[in-house]
Image: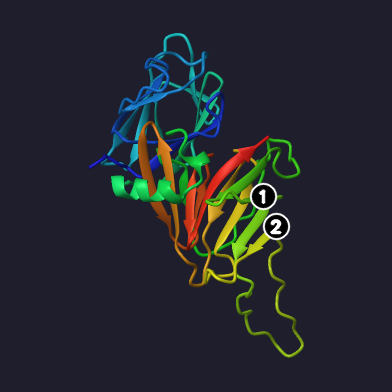
Amino acid sequence: MRWSCGFQLRVRAGPNRGQTIVIDAPVLKVGRAIRPGERVPGWVRLSDDTVSRLHCEIFWQEDRGCFRLLHRSTTNSTYVNGEVVEDIEIFDGDILEMGATSLELQKADLRWSRAETNEVEQWASVASPLAIEETKPMTGVQRIPGATIPAAKAPSNRRLTIGPTFTHVLVHQDGHEYELKGNRVRFGSNQPPEQPQTGPDESPPPLPKFDAEYEFTDQNFSYYNLVLAYDELVQSYKAVRVGPQARKVRIMRKQSGLVWHSELPEGGEVSLLEGDCLQAGELFLTYQKKG
């Protein structure tokens, strides 16, 4: 069984920006010492020339339920939340900086499982060929409480842009492309959910607005079964499954020669990576970036 503490590192800035690193060992070394593409448990390789070969180490403290960071580089500093550190405890939401790279420590609420061979073959037989050309592990998953529709947000220290700078699509197994336009896109039924009761002189609240909507009458979807919201920070879309009674949404992802899969709970969201395969009902869709 793979070791897990329920945390991950999200690269917020630097050459590896957008990557999510699952913490898979109680002692984690961070730096450039291993070769590009090499898979070594307990190592985080950053493709950043301003990061030392061994820049810092992160230790899990079981009795305290948090990590301890030790600075190891003799030439470059390590920062936590903007302060130079040598030995410090770090917690969910803390920002680690080394060289040009910024990492955020996050909770990773969903658990990914390694897919069996027959699952991989079955998926590959229906998924778009674009999704299986390269093998890239399942990362980048978070959960939000309740069944809410996520809103695209931009951090206060970055310039707000008007939606995606690249065209993103979900490619159906027959080759049809569903373009993800603007900040929010809905895949669901054409039957809106029941509105809450209001007084005789009150109007029901308006339904959320979307930049693009794809409706399916033959899939028994909920109205918000699969919603994609643009995340300005990582310049990619997040997927969320929203009920009531939303059909299951499965995700398969390849990385470092391994194939992983998971299922989104209602209200669960995941940051998509290019090449991710999603199954919603009988729809098999591949997330791609164009242009």
On the image, the x and y values in percent for residue 227 come to 59, 58
Disc assigned to residue 226 = none
> Residue 89 versus residue 97: which sits nearer the camera?
97
Quarter of the image where one finds residue 190: bottom right
Image quadrant holding the C terminus, namely top right
**In screen coordinates, is 282 left or right of 201?**
left
> Residue 187 versus residue 174: which sits nearer the camera?
174
Residue under pointer 2: 212
**In screen coordinates, is 197 left or right of 43?**
right
Quarter of the image where one finds residue 185: bottom right
Which mark lies nearer to you, 1 or 2? 1
Residue count near mark 1 (Cα–Cα under 10 Å), binned few <14, some 14–19, many ≥20: some
Residue under pointer 1: 179
Say above or below: 4 vs 84.
Answer: below
Say above or below: 236 vs 207.
Answer: above
Say above or below: 201 vs 147.
Answer: below
Say above or below: 280 vs 200.
Answer: above
Q: Are marks 1 and 2 in contact (CB under 8 Å)?
A: yes
Label 1 sits on what residue type?
A: Glu
Residue occupying image coordinates x 50% and y 61%: 267
Residue count near mark 2 (Cα–Cα under 10 Å), binned few <14, some 14–19, many ≥20: some
On the image, the x and y values in percent for residue 147 come to 52, 65
Residue occupying image coordinates x 29% and y 36%: 61
Residue occupying image coordinates x 51% and y 46%: 128
Q: Secondary structure at mark 1?
A: strand
Q: How many angstroms separate mark 1 from mark 2 (CA)?
A: 8 Å
Residue located farthest toward the bottom when viewing the structure as drawn = 200
**In screen coordinates, is 253 left or right of 174?**
left
Label 2 sits on what residue type?
A: Ala
> Residue 95 versus residue 265: which sits nearer the camera?
265
- Is residue 78 shown to the viewer in this render? yes
Return the disc, 1 or 2, that comes first in the chain's sequence: 1
